Structures are given as structure tokens and as C-alpha cells.
Amino acid sequence: MSAVGYAAVAGQVVVVGAGAPLLTGWMRQVRARLEGRAGAGVLQPWRDARKLLHKEPITPAGTGPAFRAAPALLVATTVVAAALVPLLSTDTPVSSHADLIVVVALIALGTFALALAGLDTGTAFGGMGASREMTVAALVEPTILLSVFALSIPTGTTNIPAIVSGAAHEPGRLASPAGLLATAALAVAVLAETGRIPVDNPSTHLELTMIHEAMVLEYAGPDLALVELGAQMRLTLLLGLLSSLFVPWGIATGGSWAPLPVALVLFGAKVAVLGAVLAAAEVFWAKVRLFRVPELLAGSFLLALLAVAASYFLNGAS
Amino acid sequence: MGLLRKIRATGRVAEPAPPRPEGDAPERARELGGSVQVRCVDAGSCNGCEIEIAAAFNPVYDAERYGARLVASPRHADVALVTGPVTRNMAEPLRRTVAAMSEPRLVVAVGDCAINCGEFAGGYGVEGAVSDVVPVDLAVPGCPPEPEAIVAALRRVTGR
């Protein structure tokens, strides 16, 4: 494989790793401005991470390997997924392995590791958060799979780079009923998977309403830095996946150097716009009650199912 | 849409940042580098100080712009904001909360009660001031202290 492909994979990992805290800072800044605040600045999550890395690591008494391994596993699965998903280029050395099911399984593995860590702390809130996270994950993963299946039917493969390059060459697929339904379903699934309002509130202090935060209450110092970086990278990755699937223009499809910088700039712009829209929407929404979350997620699953059905019947690609 | 119009009409409500507060930052605060996670501990306060702390983080005073953020767990925190005279029942939880924070950590006593038991000095349920239970790095006097004073103390810690 060419050097361009390797550069694209390295670029994807670096841009997701370094850009994720900036995206979180940017979203907090947008939110702060809408609330009439001044805001802490886009770089604040990087300052938080730098400080946490210099703090004393603490392992609570009674915790085992699950607690210690989870932060590294969360970041590692996200890094591998970021290398696989075609964020900058569809023609990379790993693109033939970038199957949809692998990417969803990697994301689920990170969720699972964190839920185990939450259980491992033995605290009431850790176990409660883990149980809630698994409830949400069980409803979200099928939705992500199904909504991307709807897009994979016209292409005839579940390979994500093939889906993306197919859609980039034939934009009509995205404006079809299947494409629109799949967009809506995947958007709701991404909100739930990344723990945003209306499913979870990332800035809550109320332990009783927490999902993601409840699992990580016991982490301190460098471990907490990894957990936060992992969560931020997942948000960037999933927003990137959403933009790659539904706004695929600008992603490099060939093996030449020229489109890569363009793809990098466009990726940053697309994710920044998506993040700003999400942050603005969060100002207008309230978190839904926990018992209503399955209804919301079942609704998004239904949309994904309709998308698959529409894709199958309306396109006649059987 | 009503909310959108309201946001546009209100604009920015955060007051312009006052000049950086006088006084040296505590030694350990320099290691934090402009990022401070704050955990509030009510050790027996009348809740007057809590209202002022809430006001310090509202859009008008916006302590978050200086890099301070309230968090849900002492494990995530660098600073414990302790209010009220320490009651007998809260002495041990306060010690445990401070012990659960990872180094470098600071304790900020907020309000007259936290500094010298204030109105409640000598009460039968009062163990003592905060400094009798855990080492205090910074004190914010007042009954209750104004949000500006709390923000100024937090700015001395964040150094911004």
C-alpha cells in the first residue's frame, strides 16, 4: 500500500486524538455563549487533561484488573476504530478491514469495559451507572448497525469505506427516503451512545440521574484523563462517522496526496458544525426521564428498520 | 422559537472580568495550571453560603470562565469548598472526602462559620471550625461571602 494511505490513517488517529478535547471545548463554548456566559475557552479540556496527568493516581481499595484496564481499553478501542472509519480517506491500508460490524463491536467493547469498571468499584452509583449504560447500549448498537445496513444495501457490502465512496460518487442515494430515515436514526443513536442530552447529561452533578458519569465517579488523576479523552474521542469519532456517511464530499478516495489536506480541513469544519448544532440543540432540550429513554431509542430503531425496508423495496436492489 | 428570541435579546449577561485578585496563590495551586475542579462539601452550613456559591457559577459571575468547574465526585476534584461549622456528624465524612481527593489538593473554607464557627460557635452539635478538622489553604470571610469574593478566591487558585 502507498505512503498516502498510511499518512491518512495516521492523520485520522492524530486528528481524532488531538481534536477531541478541542471539539468538547468548542461545544462548551457554544453552549456558554448561548447561555449568556463568557465561557472557559476552547482549550480548557486540554488544560484539564494536562493537570489530570500530573495528579496523583488513586486506585480505590477493593478494585481489581477491570477497573485498572478500562481507561486504556476505552482509548485503545477508540483509536483502532478511528483508524478504520474513513474520516479522511477511503483508500487506506486498513480499509478492506473496516467492516461496519467490526467498528460497532469496537465501540461496544469500550462501553463494556467501562461498565465492568463501574461494577468493579462496588459502589451503588457505579453499579447503577453500569446497568443503565448496558440498557442504553443494548438498544443503541442494533440501531447503529441497522441504519448503516440501510446505506449498505445499494452498495452491496458492509465495508464502510466502500459505502462512503459509493455515496460520494452517487449522491442521489443520500436524498432517498432510506438515506433520510437512516440519518435520523443514526443521529439519535449517536446522541445516546455518546451520553448527550436528551439521554444523559454530561455536566450533571446529580448522581441519581447519571449514566456515563456514574460509572467513572471513582477515577482520579491520569486514569480520569484517559476516561475523559476516551469519551471525547468517541464523540468525535461518531460525529465523524455521521458526517462521513451522510456528507461524504471532500473525503479523499484516490491514492494521491493533494486531496488529503482538503479532507482534513473539511473534516474539521463538518465536525465543528455538527458539534455546534448539537451544543445549540442541548440548550433547547431537557433530559428525558430514564424510563422514557427506551421509547426514544425504540423510535430510532424503528426509523432504522424503515430505512432498511425502504432501501430494500424502493431501490429494488435484491 | 420563543427561547431563540430570548437568547438573542438577552445577549451576554456575564459581567466583564474584574482585575486579577491580589495576594499570592497557594504553593500547590501552581501545579494545577489554570484548571480547577471543585467539590462542594456542606459540613453543617445554614445554606446561605451554598446560595452564594451557586451564584458564583451562574451566568453573571461565571466562575467557569477562569477554569473552575463543579464536579460530582471528590476523586475528580482539586479543591474542596467547605461551608459551615463542622458538625459532629460531618467531621468524619469531611475527613474522608478530603482524603479521597488526589494530590495536589486544596481546601477552601467559605464563610465565617467555616473559619471560626461564626454564629454557631459553642453549639452542642459543633465539632469546630474547618481548620480544626482538615488543613485549610484559603479562607473566604463573610456571612455569607459575596459571589465576587468566592470567585476571587477561586481565581487565586486557578491563576487566571
Image: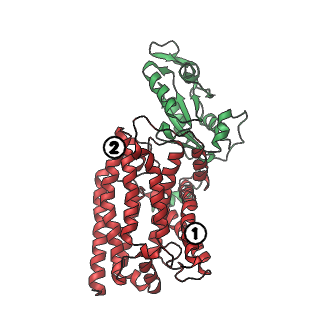
Chain colours: A red, B green
Amino acid of disc 1: Gly
Tell me the residue that label 1 is attached to: A11
Amino acid of disc 2: Gly
| Position of B85 relative to A79 (above/below) | above
| Position of A262 relative to B32 (above/below) | below
**Could you say whether the residue bearing mark 2 is in a helix, strand or loop?**
helix
| Residue A188 in sight | no
Q: How many labels does the image show?
A: 2
Residue positioned 54% across, 32% down in the render? B81
| Position of B52 relative to A183 (above/below) | above
**Could you say whether the residue bearing mark 1 is in a helix, strand or loop?**
helix
Find residue B153 and report its image quarter: top right
| Closest to the observer, A124 or A177 | A124
Subunit of label 2: A
In this image, A197 relative to A28: left or right? left
| Closest to the observer, B45 or B98 | B98
Q: Where is residue B117 in the image (x, y as percent from the top left)?
A: 54, 18
Q: Which mark is residue A127?
A: 2
In this image, A56 relative to A247: left or right? right
